[in-house]
Image (cartoon, rainbow, N blue to C red):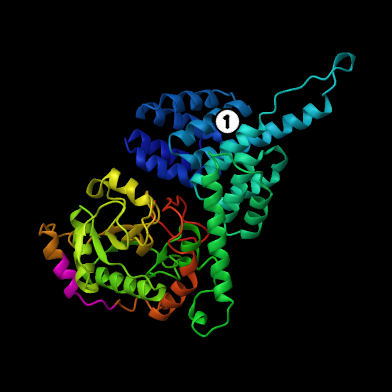
Amino acid sequence: MTTPSLDTAWHHLEAGDPHAVLRELRGLADDVPAAQVASLVQRLAADSGFDDLADAAGRLAAGAGGPVALYKYGYACVERGVSYLAAPALAEGLGLAAAEAREGEKTKRGLFGRSKPRPDSRLPILSELATALEDEERHAEAAAVLREHEPLLRDWPGRYLLAYNALMSGDRTTARATLDRLSAPDDQWRPAADRVRRALDRADAVEAGAGAGSAEVATLTPTPLSHQDLRGWHFALTGGLLATLSPYGFAAGMTGRYAFLQDSYGLCRHGLERLRLVLDATGTRPRSVSLLPGRADRALGLAAAELFGLPAESYRPGTGHTLVVAYDLNDVDGIGHETLAALRERATGEVLYEHATCWTDTPPVTADVSGLLGQTVAPPWRMLGDEPDERPAEALAAEIVAADPTQDEGDGDTPPDPDDALTAFARVAREHWLNGPRDRCRSSGPVPSSRFR
């Protein structure tokens, strides 16, 4: 028997609309037993050529509902990018495996008192469940399930993942205490441990700066490191400074991020003016602007060079004391994989600025300053409904320089983001800014925002 929601999903499948099927499944995955969803997933996976997932789903649909079958199904879901389907199946499998372990404890002595050990399947299921929840940015749930089964965990990666997910959920106390108890990591895990430790140190710096009591720091809003402090958590988790907060949708749950944004030349100019504030507040003095090869990046870089009175030159890895300007670091076709790899390691005094940072598909390199955070951003030279503006970068740069940098007042229900607040925050953060590699941060962290699926 199927539920009405599953009936709708089956209808979409028969109509040849797999994206609609996945949207439907996302909404019901936590409410419908995995075995009931499995037949639909089997068909969908088979149609997509995902034989591993089709086989695992088929076994589950046929009645193989034990911990191993649920684990294999959940594992295949994670591998195929549908972790929201994996999480409830793995949670069910973990519960069954825990029940088996308890039953095994009761009957662990067999004939003549010899023990009959049974393999404990909980640890691999637990690890995969934590991965699935982490993929879905359900970090508090991941931390909770890891903490519940902590006796099963080894330090690396188990307890490290507890520290990481606690941090990403905003629980710095658990993250710090867990990290401090870990044994020394080997070479494989040392960079991960360092990333979490640096993030905790940056969070402490934000908290200490906000507690300093000066009139300047008092302009920091909202409460530092609360679940509405987008700028504070962005810095803590990425090491980057967020130049502007969206003036729209705060009451609707956007908390400073954009969902869809039709960008404008004025917003590009506004972002560069806020970048100027950051450089001044931190005492950073680049000697040049480095131009990346993409047309959008070159346009923004040329505008920055003119506005800041700096010479512009093509980007060369290892150049110190330069401002590297990008429009969108996810535009790999425009920037190139080799250049992105080079940007991960920071040269002395080098600052990387990205105008439009995607927060739902984070870029491979984290910018030192992000102009804004958006889910989907249409550049001003690609206005919806109009023909694309194919003018060269120099013409686009002139438009940015000539544009009015004044940001509009927004919807009236969003807290203001004055220049003084950014300046104060940059001064608080500067001792921990521009430190370490520009690692990718795959999660949006503890500050939730509404998003389009």
Tag 1: residue type?
Answer: Tyr
Q: Residue 415, percent across and down?
A: 44, 77
Using the rendered image of the protein, determine whether residue 138 is visible from the camera's viewpoint: no
Q: Residue 217, percent across and down?
A: 51, 79
Q: Verify whether residue 399 appears in magenta.
A: yes
Q: Is residue 115 left or right of residue 247?
A: right
Q: Residue 261, percent across and down?
A: 30, 63
**Residue farthest along the right direction in this orientation:** 112
Residue marked by disc 1: 71
Q: Verify whether residue 334 appears in magenta.
A: no
Q: Is residue 261 left or right of residue 223?
A: left
Above-or-below relation of 292 to 429: above
By secondary structure, the bulk of the magenta-drawn segment is best described as helix
Above-or-below relation of 188 to 364: above
Residue displayed at 63% across by 29% down? 67
Q: Could you say which is closer to the camera, residue 52 or residue 366? A: 366
Q: Which residues are magenta?
A: 397-406
Above-or-below relation of 243 to 334: below
Residue displayed at 54% across by 39% down? 187
Residue displayed at 36% across by 72% down? 279
